[in-house]
Image (cartoon, helix red, strand yellow):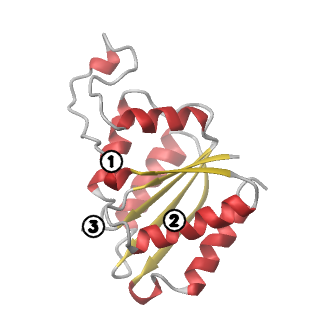
Amino acid sequence: MNILLLNGSPNPDGNTVFLADAFRKGAEEAGNKVLELQAGAMDIHGCQGCNYCKGEGAGTCIRKDDQERVYQAMKEADVIVLASPVYYFMLSAQLEAAIQRLHATGIPGRIKKSALILSSGSDDVYDAIIMQYHMIFRDYCSMQDMGIYTAHGAQNKTKSKASELEAFGRSIGK
């Protein structure tokens, strides 16, 4: 399987990167091809609501930035995994921008499965993100939810969480 791991963390040494690395390790051990894009470090601007994509652009965005790499990766992916730190009860702004820019192209029909990995400082901060994730990826895009994995506080960067995410990665494509 071709897996797109879209990591929204702007912190290259942060908890989200640790969890995403563990997932990627397991997924690759199982024979999957994983392309990780560091959306948190990419130059992706928000949708400007011009609707160029719905008219003259015919499904292409008027903005030309690193989102082009996301669009291309999505054409080749069978599975999308979103990874993000939780900032003020929401996904990172960088990942949110990448998701909102899908307004131009929509989700390519090849992607049939999705998953979510979240890291936070405290528990009970996930509800809004999980609801948004379900509404967009499961309901609107008709993707199969492969799972939601969270770590908060002292759970971050632990061997047990790494093992959990590695096992999840190994389960993809089976």
Q: State the residue at coordinates (31%, 59%).
A: 92
Q: Secondary structure at mark 2?
A: helix
| Pick the front one: 11 or 153 | 11
Q: Amino acid at mark 3?
A: Tyr
Residue 30 location, quadrant:
bottom right
Spatial CA span between label 3 and label 2: 17 Å
How many C-alpha atoms fall within 10 Å of the one at disc 3: few (<14), some, or many (≥20)?
Answer: few
Q: Earlier in the sequence, mark 3 or mark 1?
A: 1
Disc 3 versus disc 1: nearer the observer = 1
Q: State the residue at coordinates (33%, 66%).
A: 11
Q: Amino acid at mark 2?
A: Ala
Residue 153 location, quadrant:
bottom left
Residue 127 locus on image (x, y percent): 39, 67
| Pick the front one: 41 or 96 | 41
Examine the rendered structure and indicate whether residue 123 appears above or below residue 149: below
Res. 42 mark: 1
Res. 87 mark: 3
Spatial CA span between label 2 and label 1: 17 Å
Q: State the residue at coordinates (40%, 20%).
A: 59
Q: Secondary structure at mark 1?
A: loop
Spatial CA span between label 3 and label 1: 18 Å
Quarter placement of the C terminus: bottom right
Residue 15 locus on image (x, y percent): 41, 74
Q: State the residue at coordinates (64%, 42%).
A: 78
Disc 3 versus disc 2: nearer the observer = 2
Examine the rendered structure and indicate whether residue 123 appears above or below residue 115: below
How many C-alpha atoms fall within 10 Å of the one at disc 1: few (<14), some, or many (≥20)?
Answer: some
Answer left or right for 41 relative to 170: left
- Residue carrying label 2: 20
